[in-house]
Image (cartoon, grey):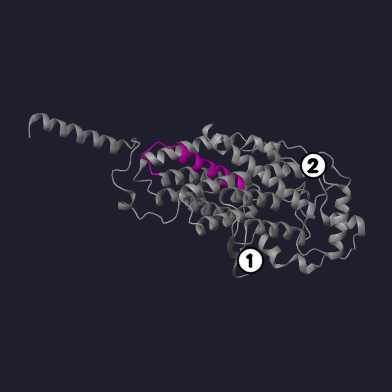
Amino acid sequence: MSLNHKLFASISLSLITISLLSGCSNSESIVPLADKIEKPSKPAVLDLVTTINEQNASLRISPVAAPRILGYSLFAAYSASKLMPEGLEKELVIATAGSEVAATMILDPSKAAELRSLQERYGSDLYPASKEFGLSIAAKVLKIARDDKYREAFTNWEPGAPATTKFAWKPTGRGEPGFEPGWGALIPLNSDSNNCVLPAPNEELVVEQAKQMYGEFTVGDAVGADVLWWLAGIATSTPAGQWMRVAVNAALDDKMSSEDALKMLTLAAMSAHDAGVMGWREKYRHNLARPETLWIELYGPNNKIKLPRETPNHPSYPSGHSVFGGAVANSMIISRGDMAVRDFLPVDLYAPYETRSWQSTSEALNEANYSRVNSGFHYPLDVEAGASLGKCVASAMNANLDKLVEGL
């Protein structure tokens, strides 16, 4: 070999070595991922959502805080996949960005470690540039979360205006002054979600539906199979988490690509977050009394209905379950059409696992909505308004999702 050839070989080897040691090269495809580790068989986003749900459930994260964690985490994962340079390991970028946001927001050290273990599963020690990029996106998303008025929601909130009907909500049970009264003060991820508002509930319709429910209601209805299922039992993590499980199953059943699954689940999670903010804003803006309160006003404190479960301690209109369900279900319909769905979980603490399936996503949503009426917790107008609000938020999010990514 000539001197020039030896010099060229030496320089080339040195450059490759520097590139590999620095971890800053955009291209990490010198050795395929499959040749280094056993690559997980499903897209990283499915692992991410499942793990977040598990941690939310084990910590009993509240129904409004759980979709906040899901929404910001999936926003980071989706943004990282869209903004990443060529040559990085996409599944690792997704897992890193999403799990880092979730781990930071969930606050529990042991659960945070479990979330960050996703980064190892997708090869963080082998592809430092991919991990570094994922972390950089997570930092940007976490900055948005720090500025969303989350802390102010618990310190500077103001009580809602007087009820928009004569049937004013009153705190129930042990909670005072009601569950998460300041949550509606949070800044939604998508500013257009602010356009999703509800008219005041019709007083005559409220009375009519309260009387109809009273005439038809039995205690057996309140503990029926549909009611137990959609109460988000021991294996789920709040209404939004339960619907995100349904969405994960849909992605698996449809054999969706990583890209398609990521977009659907991101749309669903971010919509659930914004729907929660708008739903709670509307709850405390209208301050409608629960059916149980109205039955007492109409029929006296010794009326025939004694609910076996405590009425949730926040206003009735709109239904929170329906707000979250409407957001996620309509995100799924936007992404994949109104296709069949299923789920598999224990419906209560001591119940065995069950499999439920529905011929369409809208059928599942309708059952979930009216389970809240059968429980005695809501009027039909509550669940219809909640589903409508959730659909509005999902449509607005779908229109602006990529613009939000570009704004990072």
Q: Which residue is mark 1?
A: 349
Question: For the residue labelled by badge 1, is the local secondary structure a helix, a strand or a loop?
Answer: loop
* In the rendered image, the vertical position of residue 371 relative to residue 162, given as above or below: below
Name the dominant secondary structure of the magenta segment.
helix
Name the residue located 83 percent from the left edge and 50 percent from the top edge: 289
In the image, residue 340 lies in the stretch drawn in magenta? no
**Residue 239 rendering spot, x and y as whole percentages:** 65, 54
Q: Nearer the viewer, residue 210 or 353?
A: 210
Task: Tell me where residue 29 sits by quadrant.
Answer: top left
In the image, residue 88 lies in the stretch drawn in magenta? yes
Q: Gap in Å between the C-alphas at discs 1 and 2?
A: 38 Å
**Residue 283 rendering spot, x and y as whole percentages:** 76, 45
Name the residue located 92 percent from the left edge and 60 percent from the top edge: 299
Farthest residue in the top direction?
4
Q: Nearer the viewer, residue 308 or 127?
A: 127
Magenta segment, which residues?
67-89
Q: Which residue is mark 2?
A: 199
Q: Is residue 405 left or right of residue 21?
A: right
